[in-house]
Image (tube, coloured by chain):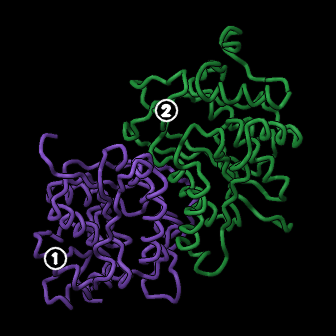
Chain colours: A purple, B green
């Protein structure tokens, strides 16, 4: 690289939040190295969406890291034997994947150090976050403390900074921000049980949060739903 | 399980330290679920050694998780283009794999939560540790702080405790301890460039630390070396 832009690793799931974060990291002036994790999630359409989003938003590159966790997660997002819930539940839902954000940030940290990147961006959100423990500000702060001790770069005094720019935003604020930054949300897939073409069920918790976000933002919802009834449900 | 033994995830590389840690976790009264990571390391003999060690030390099960990191690490342990050094160097050596222990602990944390395990054991060592930043006590403490925030279990008040029982021991002390616990070190492979049969080069930093450990412990070195000259070198 002959210019002075710094590099950032951006965790990109293919959903609405991470697409917005990629747009923000670009606006912040980074060469963006997008990282997706193929951990056997049901909704492969997410990874296809991640590819489209990385290209549309000008990522310098996009890597999909494969992690074969077998049946080691016990989550509705990876285990076909566990149904994706279609109504909000108390507490942490079965779509929780044990330590997922810890694992993704650890992989991002390793890649960031290899790339000599200064930053990692992740789209966690503490408001419309379904109750996941690893989406909270204290989790992000704890990972930064770990990263400051974990790498050769950190020992040499060159910090890799973790950015979670959506952490305090509502879904409506995220959608407004991304729209200003030129994100085409029709490319993204948020649904926990999207079909092979990326069409959303319209009924799961993730679809519900997303739809409410567009409605509250006063923006048209570009999501492709499996059927109109689902979209209205 | 009908008995009351608690479960532990034990990170098992196939080397001397992690074999000792597995023996310790068993002595502590845990059902041990051994976890190895296949991250494209050169010395595949390590994974074969991990299998033998898990069986010999009575692990309840042994899983090898595959992680395809491509050429994303820039380490002599995964990149054939980087030579393994045969003499000690100043600073952090090229055998450092970016964020390796962070990644391995993150995966162990996810599996521990799925298993409802109370503990994770890792064989990091701060004395004979080649200068890796992620082998230090402060790194271990920072990961514990992260784990306490990262999981559903932790939110529910049931901590997953990280044990690094070798952290302050010399290699000689580790070898003595493991010998008392019945570890057969002939099964283990520490060499950074072991051959396909697990025979050690006798010259790399890891071989050097290991050989000095047996010598200082006053115990015979059961390591299989590629040639006697290497062993004496």
Please give the name of the residue rendered at 24% of the width and 54% of the height, measured from the top-left corner: A51
Describe the element under mark 2 as helix, strand or loop. loop
Q: Is A202 displayed left or right of A38 in the figure?
A: left
Q: Read off the chain for label 2.
A: B
Residue A71 visible somewhere in the drawing = no
Residue A38 visible somewhere in the drawing = yes
Q: Nearer the viewer, residue A233 or B19?
A: B19
| x and y, in percent, of residue A157 in the image | 38, 52
Q: Nearer the viewer, residue B179 or A76?
A: B179
Q: Read off the chain for label 1.
A: A
> Residue at label 1?
A222
Please give the name of the residue rendered at 22% of the width and 63% of the height, measured from the top-left corner: A22
> Residue at label 2?
B90
| x and y, in percent, of residue B15 in the image | 68, 36
The quarter of the rendered structure image containing the N terminus of chain B is bottom right
Is A62 situated above or below B76? Answer: below
Q: How many marks?
A: 2
The quarter of the rendered structure image containing the C terminus of chain B is top right
């Amino acid at each position: 690289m002959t210019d002075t832009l710094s590099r950032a690793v951006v965790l990109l799931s293919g959903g609405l939040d991470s697409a917005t974060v990629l747009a923000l990291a670009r606006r912040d002036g980074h060469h963006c190295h997008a990282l997706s994790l193929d951990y056997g999630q049901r909704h492969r359409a997410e990874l296809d969406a991640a590819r489209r989003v990385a290209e549309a938003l000008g990522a310098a590159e996009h890597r999909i890291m494969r992690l074969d966790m077998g049946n080691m997660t016990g989550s509705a997002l990876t285990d076909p034997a566990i149904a994706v819930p279609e109504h909000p539940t108390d507490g942490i839902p079965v779509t929780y994947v044990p330590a997922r954000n810890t694992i993704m940030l650890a992989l991002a940290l390793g890649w960031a150090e290899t790339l000599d990147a200064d930053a990692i961006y992740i789209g966690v959100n503490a408001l419309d976050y379904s109750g996941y423990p690893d989406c909270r500000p204290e989790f992000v702060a704890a990972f930064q403390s770990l990263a400051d001790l974990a790498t050769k770069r950190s020992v040499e005094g060159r910090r890799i900074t973790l950015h979670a720019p959506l952490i305090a935003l509502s879904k409506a604020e995220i959608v407004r921000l991304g729209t200003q930054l030129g994100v085409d949300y029709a490319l993204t897939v948020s649904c926990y049980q999207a079909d092979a073409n990326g069409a959303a069920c319209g009924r799961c918790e993730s679809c519900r949060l997303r739809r409410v976000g567009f409605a509250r933002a006063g923006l048209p919802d570009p999501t492709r739903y499996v059927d109109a009834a689902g979209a209205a449900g």
